[in-house]
Amino acid sequence: MRLNELHDNPGAIKTKKRIARGPGSGKGKTAGRGMKGQKSRSGVAIKGYEGGQMPLYQRLPKRGFSKPNRKAFSVVNLGLIQKFIDEGKLNGEITEDSLIASGLVRRKLDGVRILAKGAFTAKIKIAVTGASGTAKAAVEAAGGSLTLLPTVSSAE
């Protein structure tokens, strides 16, 4: 087999229809949009207009509130921390930076929050921005300590 004999499977490559490229293309002149009218022009939003009637998206009730300055935390479960300790990827005092360095957390965001899912047996110190009450209890039951750091506001 030579390079000039290589080819793709039949039907694997489909050429794109070139619209508005002359009468020979089969989609020339009006480019498949028909004659005149609003839908033949560019910049049309006809689906959102209901002939003067109040549009559906405005008739439906809006619920809730999105807090513009809410905190976003990276979440880690105790079971995963225990797994990384057993594999030797985490040791000593666990901080947010050590969690990132080990690959357990991708980015810190506004801090790291620990949740209590999974079994935890390591007697270790953990210092993070947030933790659930059950996570704190589980770490202390294993003989370790969990200290909460102050949150850093992203506006500063």
Image (cartoon, helix red, strand yellow):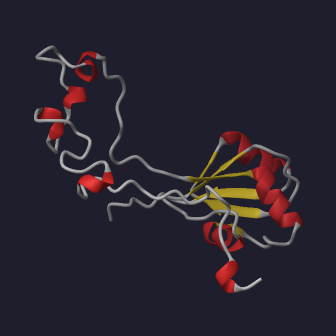
Position in image of residue 31 (x %, y %): 24, 47
Question: Based on the displayed image, in which of its 4 quarters is residue 35 positioned?
Answer: top left
Seen at 20% across and 36% down, the residue is 34
Residue 50 is at least partly visible in this image: yes
Name the foreground residue: 92 vs 4: 4
Position in image of residue 128 (x %, y %): 61, 60
Position in image of residue 155 (x %, y %): 32, 60
Name the quarter where the C terminus is drawn.
bottom left
Would residue 108 be found to the left or right of residue 36 on screen? right
Position in image of residue 75 (x %, y %): 62, 51
Name the quarter where the N terminus is drawn.
bottom right
In the rendered view, would you say 46 is above or below 50?
Answer: below
Seen at 48% across and 51% down, the residue is 72
Name the foreground residue: 60 vs 86: 60
Residue 123 is at least partly visible in this image: no
Seen at 89% across and 64% down, the residue is 86
In the rendered view, would you say 103 is above or below 150?
Answer: below
Question: Residue placed farthest to the bottom in the image?
Answer: 2
Would residue 40 be found to the left or right of residue 137 on screen? left
Seen at 29% across and 53% down, the residue is 19
Question: Based on the displayed image, in which of its 4 quarters is residue 153 positioned?
Answer: bottom left
Name the foreground residue: 154 vs 54: 54
Name the foreground residue: 3 vs 44: 3
